[in-house]
Image (cartoon, rainbow, N blue to C red):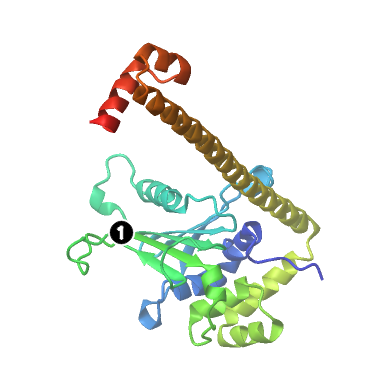
């Protein structure tokens, strides 16, 4: 059987972002948002993204996100990112604000704007805290328990941090992340037993692997991801090498300048005229005057 990775953004969208898989998305969101019992989501509207069928999936790394709306009107955006492009903080604020403001039509009042949540699943570490699930709101600096409004909610789930911890099967989110992490069969079976929607997600994943067109799109996305990683790694290495060369050049220049100053110091001590010192050391007359003042005052 052709095995796909659920973390591939194209595959992730096919599993969680389709109307026929609504039950899967509801279970996943209840796990991420930690909603239980009477607070749990029972239904949701999925706003399907059909761009991949219209555009080339290997055309850079376009955004393959999932948009949904709860019965109360809360806007939710889910994005999975494999490549660290070092801009997730600004990027997520941009897409949050876009989703938030798109709710309002001309003539509508601001109080009609609904809560907007963005969920970022990252396959790299980004947030400088230990926990793998970080949640951000608008809090007052001096009074940390005072929230200005609940309309903004941004979540980061960092998979590398999750991999460092022992999964807790009693936690719905841990069970879902075990599915995303392509866990061993016996571990995944435990997760599926605790959450039937994970079993359905696994069946969808297996089905996608049997579809030739899906596999083609999958491979194109994998190639695009690999190419982007190569590009960023190459740019970093080039920047490091350039920095080393600049450091060497700066060191050489500083050494030459020190030699010139040492020659100038000796020439001043021996009574040479400033014009002669300037000619043979390359130090300007103003620099010579300042040097005399600093060295011999």
Tag 1 secondary structure: loop
Tell me the residue that label 1 is attached to.
Answer: 151
Which percent across, then down, holds residue 65?
54, 55
Q: Quadrant of residue 284?
A: top left
Q: Is residue 130 left or right of residue 203?
A: left
Query: Label 1 neighbourhood size at 10 Å, few (<14), some (14-19), many (20+)?
Result: some
- x and y, in percent, of residue 10 in the image: 64, 57
Residue at 28% across / 62% down in the picture?
150
Foreground residue, 145 or 106? 145
Residue 41: horizontal and vertical position, in percent?
Answer: 43, 73
247 or 223: nearer the viewer: 247
Q: Residue furthest front?
A: 270
Would you say 20 lies left or right of 27 here? right
Viewed as shown, does residue 27 lie left or right of 192? left
**Quadrant for the N terminus in the image:** bottom right
Nearest the eye: 14 or 82: 82
Residue at x-position 31% and y-position 62%:
137
In the image as oriented, which residue stretches furthest toward the top? 275
Residue 267 drawn at (x, y percent): 40, 23
Residue 39 visible? The answer is: yes
């Amino acid at each position: 059987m052709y095995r796909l990775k659920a973390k591939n953004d194209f595959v992730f969208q096919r599993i969680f972002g389709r109307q026929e898989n609504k039950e899967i998305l509801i279970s996943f969101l209840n796990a991420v948002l930690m909603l239980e019992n009477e607070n749990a989501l029972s239904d949701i509207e999925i706003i399907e993204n059909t761009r991949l069928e219209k555009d080339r999936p290997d055309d850079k790394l376009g955004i393959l996100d999932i948009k949904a709306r709860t019965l109360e009107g809360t806007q939710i955006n889910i994005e999975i990112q494999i490549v660290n492009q070092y801009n997730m903080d600004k990027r997520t604020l941009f897409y949050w604000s876009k989703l938030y403001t798109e709710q309002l039509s001309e003539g509508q009042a601001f109080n009609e704007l609904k809560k907007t949540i963005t969920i970022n699943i990252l396959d790299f570490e980004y947030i400088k805290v230990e926990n793998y699930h970080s949640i951000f709101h608008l809090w007052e600096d001096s009074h940390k328990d005072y929230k200005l409004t609940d309309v903004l909610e941004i979540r980061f789930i960092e998979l590398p941090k999750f991999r460092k911890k022992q999964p807790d099967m009693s936690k719905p989110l841990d069970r879902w992340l075990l599915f995303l992490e392509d866990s061993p069969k016996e571990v995944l079976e435990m997760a599926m037993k605790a959450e039937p929607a994970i079993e359905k997600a696994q069946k969808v994943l297996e089905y996608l692997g049997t579809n030739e067109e899906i596999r083609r799109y999958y491979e194109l996305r994998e190639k695009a991801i690999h190419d982007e990683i190569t590009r960023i790694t190459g740019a970093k290495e080039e920047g490091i090498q350039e920095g080393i060369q600049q450091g060497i050049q700066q060191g050489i220049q500083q050494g030459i300048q020190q030699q010139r100053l040492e020659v100038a110091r000796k020439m001043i001590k021996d009574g040479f005229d400033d014009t002669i010192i300037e000619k043979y050391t390359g130090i300007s007359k103003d620099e010579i005057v300042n040097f005399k003042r600093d060295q011999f005052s």
